[in-house]
Image (spheres, rainbow, N blue to C red):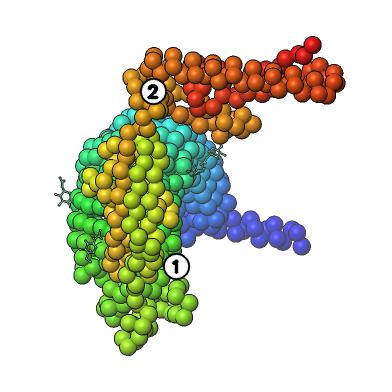
Amino acid sequence: MPHTMQRGFLLLAACCSLLSITPISACPARCECIPHLKSVACHRKRLTSVPEGIPTETKILELNKNRIRCLNSGELSSFPMLEELDFSENIITNMEPGAFSNLFSLQVLRLRRNQLKLIPPGIFQKLTNLTLLDISENKIVILLDYMFQDLRNLKHLEVGDNDLVYISRKAFSGLVSLQELTIEKCNLTDLSADSLSRLQNLETLRLKHLGITLVEDQNFRKLYNLWLLEIDNWLSLEDISPNAFQGLNLTSLFITFTNITAVPMTALRNLVHLVHLNLSHNPISTVPKGAFQELTRLRELHMVGALLASVEPQALYGLRQIRLLNLSSNFLSTLEESAFHSVNTLETLRVDQNPLVCDCRLLWILQRRKTLNFDGRPPMCSSPLEIQGNALHDFPDSVLFEYFTCQKPKIRNRSLQRVTAYKGQAVSFQCRAEGEPVPSISWVSPQHRMITSKSLGRATVLPGGTLEIRYAQAQDSGTYICIASNAAGNDTYFATLTVKGPPADSILDANRTWVLRDFNDTSHNDTQVFIKFTLDLKTILVSTAMGCITFLGVVLFCFLLLFVWSRGRGQHKNNFSGEYSFRKVDGPTTASGQGGARKFNMKMI
Ligand SMILES: *[C@@H]1O[C@H](CO)[C@@H](O)[C@H](O)[C@H]1NC(C)=O
Ligand SMILES: *[C@@H]1O[C@H](CO)[C@@H](O)[C@H](O)[C@H]1NC(C)=O
Ligand SMILES: *[C@@H]1O[C@H](CO)[C@@H](O)[C@H](O)[C@H]1NC(C)=O
Ligand SMILES: *[C@@H]1O[C@H](CO)[C@@H](O)[C@H](O)[C@H]1NC(C)=O
Ligand SMILES: *[C@@H]1O[C@H](CO)[C@@H](O)[C@H](O)[C@H]1NC(C)=O
């Protein structure tokens, strides 16, 4: 039995080798050939080298998913007609110089998923017709200078998923036709503008899964022809410089799955031809007023899954041509018409997967529910309770004014507040308002400045709507106006403040300033309060004298008391300790920095 089998194999092998030397309909053993396409495909054949018997006129050679380890010099030189060559998914670790020599017609070279660590200089020499080169998923650590020097017709380059840590400054030199570049899943922590700036015909640049933390100023300078930039999955990206996109004329920009927490407003300002912007999956909580102000040609805006809690009034101001807005999967309770430049251009709107409150603020969507395209995912009400889970486009006209209503703000407790305060004191005015939706409270100062909860400085609005002014100054005097406003309207209310100079007998108001600690409670170091004193020499003297007199008086009084007491009770106690605390009047003593409370001990004989 084994004998006959062996003979059979020999016979088969002989047949195959016979076939392979026949020149016309030749096809290497274990390969599939399509003669009219001049293509030879040998997938998954466990080949360890380029098989013999490949017709010389072959144009397409596919050797992917084999076990080829090395590409020797001249190995392919007998196939000068080759246009497409696929070595993907082999175990190539080494390519000898000259491995691709003679392949003047080669247009596509795929070396994806091999074990290449280094691309030897000059290996791609003479591949002047190459248009696509894929060296992704290898183990390349560095892109060397002039590595692609002769590839002057290369249009697409894939260098993704390598262990790339560095791209040399002149690595992309010579790639004058490159239109598309993808750099993906590398250990790059820096992307130098110098290396990219050599790609002056680049049209699309995709940079995915990189560990870069900052997009620097002019990072993409000289990429005059770039129209699509994709920054995706840069999980450590925290910041985009204001001039990061300077010099670019993009029509599409994707910044997705990064760690930026705000719309890069200033950086976007240069991109006046932008049509398509995607800022999805970034932890951006709010779209502020005028965020996209200059983007007058923008048609599509995506901010999906971005943790958005608010789109402020006029946030989309300037977007005169917006057609598609995708705000799916956020934390928006509403989307007001006032956010838009005009809602009339809008064709597609996605605000599903948001906790929408169905009140008058969403009426504009309701009114357009027959014409707006919700992309199959209409917005749903999550409140009020009666209509929770109802889709917006299901409501009949008759019930609109039953549910989609708001209630004008009403300020409670309208008694006029007049407050007189001394300079340096803290003052607060209350302003509580009711309404549907909950009104927002802001105040207007006597100088007609707006004070909101975001105001920094001495005056701010606390969460309940209370206006707080710290360290009141004379110029703070005047009338303050509280404005409670919501989508239904606003309500106002007045309060007046008079700030007086210091009381006459005070030691304030002079030409020297002291900052001191008032240890009112020595047991809590963290509750130290800082008080500002202004002193002059006369008051120091007078109050020192007064302090001494009261001090001595108290001591004498104590002695007297003790004397009387010890007489009455006999000689039981020889020791006693008393405590004396300096308070406000003892300013000078404390001012000299010795602390407020002190103890003294004395012995009785
Ligand atoms: C990057 O570096 C890490 C550790 O230094 C390594 O495990 C990983 O394989 C490298 N490559 C990529 C593409 O992340
Ligand atoms: C993203 O930012 C947050 C806070 O700003 C930080 O805690 C987190 O580590 C950052 N993530 C990465 C991957 O850098
Ligand atoms: C920017 O791009 C737009 C559209 O792609 C084009 O019309 C315009 O001329 C370009 N501007 C410059 C300065 O290249
Ligand atoms: C909105 O975004 C979601 C999630 O990215 C996407 O699946 C959907 O196609 C987008 N809709 C439109 C109309 O672009
Ligand atoms: C308050 O409402 C009036 C009209 O109802 C409006 O003219 C005014 O601009 C509003 N003020 C504020 C601050 O919202």
Residue 520: name its quadrant: top right
For badge 1, the amino acid type reads Pro
The structure residue drawn at horizontal position 83% and vertical position 24%, both measured from the top left corner, is 569
The residue singled out by tag 2 in the image is 534
Above or below for 29 versus 149: below
Q: Nearer the viewer, mark 1 or mark 2?
A: 2
In-front residue for pair 551/335: 551
Which quadrant would the C terminus be assigned to in this image?
A: top right
Q: Is residue 344 above or below residue 527?
A: below
x then y, percent, for residue 121: 39, 30
Q: Where does residue 115 sit, x and y in percent of width and height?
A: 53, 40
Can the viewer see residue 278?
Answer: no
Badge 2, how many Cα within 10 Å: few under 14, some, many 20+? some
Quadrant assignment for the N terminus = bottom right
Which label belongs to residue 438?
A: none
Q: Judge: label 1 CB < 8 Å from ligand 4.
A: no
Which picture quadrant has residue 349?
bottom left
Residue 177 vs residue 453: left or right?
A: left
Residue in view at x 44 percent, y 67 percent: 355
Amino acid carrying label 2: it is Thr
- Mark toward the start of the polypeptide (1 vs 2): 1
Categorize mark 1 by other alpha carbons within 10 Å: few (<14), some (14-19), many (20+).
many
Numbered-mark total: 2
Secondary structure under tag 2 reads strand
- Do residues under tags 1 and 2 come within 8 Å of each other at their CB atoms? no
Which residue occupies the foreground of this view, 515 or 204? 515
Give the camera-side residue of 445 and 116. Answer: 445
Taking the image as four quarters, which one is ligand 5 found in? Answer: bottom left
* Disc assigned to residue 355: 1
Asked if residue 509 shows in the view, the reply is yes
